[in-house]
Structures are given as structure tokens and as C-alpha cells.
């Protein structure tokens, strides 16, 4: 299944892509989260209003101001009579509610309880969304990874890829669960407080705006530097994990060659670089909050000082709400101070989340970079199907597993033709390079007739394994043609092409699971009896029955409890149960001792019977019975023939087989 949510949209921003994922998968949940955050922010603002404009001005002001009982207007302040043209009563805004002191307290308690419920609910929902997005990303990354070409894994360390699945995805979850709701809540609170300050007093708001501009510039400066280093930190983590993974897999080699100190030095270089970039990233991120808090405290003190002076002097302010002047009161100044603190405090809260946000966005860049990697393309349309013979001995498609195969070839006119799979493979003037500027195979031409055993020999790096990679279309050739039963392999679907090719690799790979499950990996619908038969064919049955739980023995760590030869036997059995028409044996017996090799060779001979076989071998004794032997050197076929004819030529093969130097002519 192709990933849908991780496909690259038009927007290039990682945050926008992330939000698009959330809206796509959790639209209702996210809408409820936004509403809860909005309600929580509003309760904070309303609480500030009640505290200043109502509790102080309505219930405490009468003890400071003398009120005209007929007009309900303040006529005498702490510094003397008030101007007679005062347009508004200091507590007129609450009079229509008709609430007493106890009722106001109850309203405040209810507001704060409602805000607390909203706070809990949106944090709970965001945790649920974060876990869900984390699961979706990992599912889709893994699904997408299955479609990536082999070349991607050849050019990226496994540890770096694993770091994306672990560190980067977890950093993203942390941001969604905590940093994002805090940031959104802070923004709502800031906007609400700014609106209330604008409606409360214009002159005091100018002071807040000046401080807000200063805080914004400082935040922008620190954020720019920290983000750059957080991106580098995530890369350093991937490289360090890649180095650790490489060292763990090579422990035996390290100890044999006493390379521990060099490895410690190499790890220290990676770790020091990670330490340096992480320190720089956190330095800029951590310094922001103390600066914001101190500026907020300074702003609070200045506003309190100015407000006190205005009250004492009986200064008349300006409110956008009333579109006119209003004398400063203790309630107005108190509310404004609470608004200003609620306005600056979210900036400090957001600065605390800067680490998580920068780290997560850096991880998101790496996640989306992997998700944007071009999947392996497959323009093939010829399929491999089970077939049986009709009365004219022609192939007919069937759902039953007959052991016979045919190529199903659809044509432009809508007709379909079937061709028996015979195992004929031809390469015509093939040139190939892993990069276009470095060709490693030159003008390779070979013919493998059905049932033939073709061997490749030559020094390391001559191009033997590369040819088998081309047959599987792990890579595509630069020039020439490869035909399979006279069909260009570019026309064959890659899954069907690879299903027809059984491979036994030099480096065995066993997965965590039982012995039977590892053999059945070659054909998932195989019965237990077929698994046992395949093991017997590969001569693996004897040692399997000697294991503690036989075929149900659990293998871990790549089958570390087995010898290299035993692991290779299981790999051969896995290929045997696949029962492929064509076999590719890449040093299949290189890790097996001579006695075991003799047993395996008998099983291999039975597997190879009637099949086209490609063999790569350094041990020339295993390929003497090959129909054709290709001698490669520096990416070219320099000799070809059977064992006897090549010995008679006294060329490169003769030198490899006998160990004698070639006499110069």
C-alpha cells in the first residue's frame, strides 16, 4: 500500500505538512482541541477582568471613592474632588448583572474550573493525536521504505535510518503532545489579552507594544540560531547511531585486529561534534526564557509605576471600548497589569518549548526527506503466473500451484499471450555503473540456455555480484539489453521477475523467529511438511533436529546461536522451498567446511536440476561441472568456456585454478 499522508504537497514547510496530516486524520479531534484552547484562554482573560474591574472597583472602590448615591457616580477620590464631567461610572459595567460579592466569587471559581477542564481535555486529546500521528508516520515510513530501491540503502547507513524511526519521530510526538498545544494556547491568550488591553487603555498599551517588539526581535534572533544547530544536532545523532550500529555489527573483527582504541577515538569524534552542536542549539534556546521573563518583570514594574502616577494625578485615559476617556482606577490598573502579565507570560512559555519545536521540526525535515525519496519505479507489465498444459501443450493460466510457470504478456489490442518460463537469459552489450561517470561493467554479453549452469569467476571487484544485481533489477543498466526468455526484463514486473529468481547470498540473513518460520520465508504458504522436505533437500534437517526445540527453535540476533555453516544451510533451504526456475548462488558455500560442502553440494545438485543456474565462486572446485565459466576482470569478460577448455587456454582461469603464473608470450 502506497503512503498517502506523507506524499509531498505543494507547501514546502514541514510544519504545514504536519498540520495537513493532523487535519486529514483527526479533523474533529483537532477542532475540539482548538475550541478547548480558545475557551481556556478566554477564561484567563475574563478572570483578569473580574479581578480588577469588578472585585476591586465594585466592591473595594467605595472604601476609597465617595459615591453620589443619586447618580451612582464617583465625586470624591483619594486626592480630592473628581472632575464633574466624568463620563462613566467606575462600576457601571457590572451593575446590570446585579451580583453580590459572594456571587462574583462563585462565578470566578466556575470560570477557573471550566478553564481547568478545558486545559485537561485539550492536553488529553493532543496526547492521543500525537500518539496516532506517530503511529501513522512509522507505518507509512516503513511501507514507503519497502518501495525504495536498493541503491538508497547502499548509500545510507542503517543507523541513520533507524534514527529517523526513533529519535526524529519521537521528537515529533513530543512537540505535538506538549509544545504545540502550549504554543497555540499562548497565542490565543496573547491575542485575547492584547484585545482587552486595547479596549481598556490605549496609553498603557503603547508601553506593552514597545516591549513586545523588543521581545519579538530577541526571540527571532535566538530562534534562528537554535534551529540551525538543532537541524545539525539531528544529523549528528543519525551519524552517531550509524557509527554505533556499524561497530556493534563488527565486534568480532574489531577484537581480532585490536581496533578498540581507534574505534573509541572515532566515536569520540562523532560524540564531540554532537555535543558541540547540541550545546550551541540549547544555549540559544535556553537563554531566551530568562530574557523574556526579566523583560516581562521590567514591563510590569513600569506599568505599575505609570498606573500609580495616573491614579494619584487623576489622569483621564482613553478606551477603544467606550471611545472616550475614563479616569484611572485601581481596578483598571490592576486588570491591565494582569493582562500585561498574561500577555508576556505566554512568550516565556513558548520559549520553554523552543527546544522541542526546533528539535521536532528538524526531525520532521528528515522524516519528510525520507518520505519524499523516490520509490522504485516499475514500468513492467508482463506477469509470472502458474500454468498448466492444454491439449496442444501450450501454457494455460491456472490458480493451482502446478510447479510450472508462464509469462503472461498483455498486448495493446487487448489480447493476452502466454509463454513458458524456460530460464533463458541473455545479456547483450551491457554497460553499467553505479554512477554515470564511473562504469564498472563494460560490454557484457552472455547467453544462458535453459538448464545451463553458468559460473562467474574472477578477482574481487571484477563485477560478478553486480551482474546478478542487474538480473534482479536492483539497478538498471546504462546501455545494452537484458532478455529473459526473449522478453526485455524492463517489461517484466519487478515482483514477478524476482519471484522467478532464487538467490542464496554470501552473507546470510536470518530473522527473529523459529527455524520453520525462517525457512518458510521463501514461500509463506508452504506447509510444515514442505518446509521439512526443503530442509532435507538442503541437508539441514539433521542439525535442525539436534536443536533444543527442533524446527520450533527460536532464533535471535540473526541466528547468532548457530554456526555460519548452519545459517547458510537454512538460507539454502529457504531458497529450495521457493522452488524458483532460475537460481543465483553468490558464494553459497563459501562459509561451509569441506565436509558440509559435500553434503550441501548434493542437495544443491538436486535443487539445480532442470534449472538455469548462475554461480559466483572463489572456490573453483565447486564450479568445475559448470556448462559455461565466465572469467571477469575489471568489469569485462576476458575468457569463457568450460573447465577443460579454459585450462587448455592457460589464461587467467588457468592461473586462478593452478596458482601458476601465466607465461608471458
Image: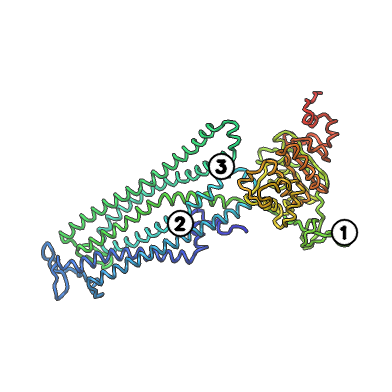
Q: The C terminus lies in which quarter of the figure? A: top right
Q: Earlier in the sequence, mark 2 or mark 3?
A: 2
Disc 1 and disc 2 in contact, CB within 8 angstroms? no
Query: Does 74 appear above or below 242?
Result: below
Q: Which mark is residue 393?
A: 1
Query: Does 445 appear above or below 121?
Result: above
Judged by depth in the image, the label closer to the viewer, 2 or 3, is 3
Q: What's the residue at 14%, 70% (across, down)?
A: 67
Q: What's the residue at 60%, 55% (across, down)?
A: 143
Q: Which mark is residue 176?
A: 2
What residue is disc 3 on? Answer: 245
Query: Does 664 appear above or below 123?
Result: above
Position in image of residue 256 (x %, y %): 60, 32
**In this image, 411 relative to 110: left or right?**
right
Judged by depth in the image, the label closer to the viewer, 1 or 3, is 3
What is the CA distance from the residue labelled 1 to the residue labelled 3?
55 Å
Q: Residues within 10 Å of mark 3 (few under 14, many from 20)?
A: some
Residue, far left: 80
Q: Earlier in the sequence, mark 1 or mark 3?
A: 3
Amino acid at each position: 500500500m502506497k503512503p498517502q499522508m506523507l506524499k509531498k504537497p505543494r507547501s514546502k514547510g514541514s510544519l504545514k505538512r504536519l498540520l495537513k496530516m493532523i487535519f486529514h486524520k483527526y479533523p474533529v479531534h483537532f477542532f475540539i482541541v482548538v475550541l478547548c484552547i480558545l475557551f481556556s484562554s478566554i477564561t484567563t482573560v475574563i478572570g483578569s477582568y473580574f479581578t480588577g474591574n469588578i472585585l476591586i472597583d465594585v466592591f473595594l472602590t467605595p472604601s476609597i471613592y465617595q459615591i453620589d448615591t443619586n447618580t451612582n457616580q464617583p465625586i470624591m477620590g483619594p486626592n480630592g474632588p473628581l472632575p464633574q464631567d466624568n463620563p462613566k461610572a467606575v462600576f457601571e459595567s457590572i451593575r446590570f448583572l446585579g451580583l453580590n460579592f459572594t456571587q462574583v466569587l462563585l462565578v470566578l471559581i466556575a470560570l477557573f474550573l471550566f478553564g481547568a477542564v478545558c486545559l485537561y481535555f485539550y492536553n488529553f486529546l493532543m496526547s492521543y493525536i500525537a500518539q496516532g500521528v506517530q503511529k501513522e508516520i512509522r507505518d507509512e515510513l516503513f511501507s514507503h521504505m519497502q518501495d525504495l530501491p536498493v541503491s538508497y540503502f547502499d548509500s545510507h547507513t542503517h543507523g541513520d535510518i533507524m534514527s529517523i524511526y526513533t529519535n526524529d519521530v519521537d521528537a515529533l510526538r513530543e512537540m505535538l503532545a506538549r509544545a504545540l498545544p502550549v504554543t497555540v494556547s499562548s497565542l490565543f491568550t496573547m491575542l485575547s489579552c492584547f484585545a482587552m488591553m486595547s479596549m481598556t487603555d490605549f496609553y498603557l498599551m503603547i508601553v506593552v507594544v514597545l516591549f513586545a517588539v523588543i521581545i519579538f526581535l530577541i526571540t527571532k534572533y535566538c530562534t534562528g540560531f537554535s534551529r540551525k544547530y538543532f537541524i545539525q544536532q539531528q544529523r549528528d545523532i543519525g551519524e552517531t547511531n550509524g557509527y554505533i550500529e556499524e561497530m556493534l555489527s563488527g565486534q568480532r573483527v574489531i577484537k581480532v585486529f585490536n581496533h578498540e582504541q581507534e574505534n573509541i577515538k572515532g566515536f569520540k569524534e562523532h560524540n564531540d561534534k554532537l555535543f558541540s552542536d547540541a550545546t550551541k542549539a540549547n544555549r540559544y534556546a535556553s537563554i531566551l526564557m530568562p530574557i523574556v521573563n526579566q523583560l516581562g518583570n521590567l514591563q510590569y514594574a513600569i506599568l505599575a509605576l505609570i498606573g500609580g502616577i495616573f491614579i494619584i494625578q487623576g489622569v483621564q485615559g482613553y478606551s477603544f471600548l467606550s471611545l472616550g476617556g475614563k479616569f484611572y482606577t485601581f481596578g483598571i490598573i490592576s486588570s491591565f497589569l494582569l493582562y500585561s502579565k498574561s500577555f508576556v507570560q505566554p512568550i516565556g512559555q513558548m520559549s520553554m518549548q523552543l527546544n522541542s519545536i526546533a528539535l521536532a521540526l528538524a526531525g520532521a525535515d528528515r522524516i519528510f526527506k525520507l518520505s519524499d525519496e523516490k520509490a522504485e519505479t516499475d514500468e513492467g507489465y508482463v506477469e509470472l503466473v502458474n500454468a498448466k498444459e492444454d491439449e496442444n501443450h501450450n501454457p494455460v493460466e491456472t490458480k493451482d500451484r502446478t510447479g510450472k510457470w508462464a509469462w503472461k504478456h498483455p498486448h495493446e489490442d487487448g489480447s493476452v499471450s502466454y509463454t513458458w518460463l524456460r530460464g533463458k537469459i541473455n545479456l547483450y552489450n551491457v554497460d553499467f555503473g553505479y554512477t554515470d561517470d564511473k562504469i564498472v561493467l563494460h560490454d557484457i554479453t552472455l547467453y544462458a540456455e535453459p538448464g545451463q549452469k553458468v559460473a562467474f569467476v574472477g578477482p574481487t571487484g571484477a563485477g560478478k555480484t553486480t551482474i546478478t544485481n542487474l538480473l534482479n533489477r536492483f539497478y538498471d543498466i546504462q546501455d545494452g539489453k537484458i532478455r529473459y526468455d526473449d522478453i526485455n526484463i524492463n517489461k517484466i514486473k519487478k515482483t514477478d521477475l524476482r519471484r522467478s529468481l532464487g538467490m542464496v547470498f554470501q552473507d546470510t540473513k536470518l530473522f527473529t523467529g523459529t527455524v520453520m518460520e525462517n525457512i518458510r520465508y521463501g514461500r509463506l504458504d508452504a506447509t510444515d511438511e514442505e518446509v521439512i522436505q526443503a530442509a532435507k533437500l538442503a541437508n539441514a534437517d539433521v542439525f535442525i533436529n539436534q536443536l533444543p526445540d527442533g524446527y520450533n527453535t527460536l532464533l535471535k540476533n540473526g541466528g547468532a546461536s548457530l554456526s555460519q555453516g548452519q545459517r547458510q544451510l537454512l538460507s539454502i533451504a529457504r531458497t529450495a522451498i521457493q522452488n524458483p526456475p532460475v537460481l543465483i548462488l553468490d558464494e553459497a558455500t563459501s562459509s561451509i567446511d569441506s565436509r558440509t560442502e559435500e553434503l550441501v553440494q548434493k542437495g544443491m545438485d538436486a535443487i539445480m536440476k532442470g534449472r538455469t543456474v548462475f554461480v559466483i565462486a572463489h572456490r573453483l572446485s565447486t564450479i568445475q561441472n559448470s556448462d559455461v565459466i565466465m572469467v571477469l576482470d575489471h568489469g569485462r569478460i576476458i575468457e569463457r568456456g568450460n573447465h577443460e577448455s579454459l585450462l587448455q587456454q592457460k589464461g587467467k582461469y588457468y592461473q586462478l585454478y593452478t596458482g601458476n603464473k601465466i607465461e608471458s608470450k
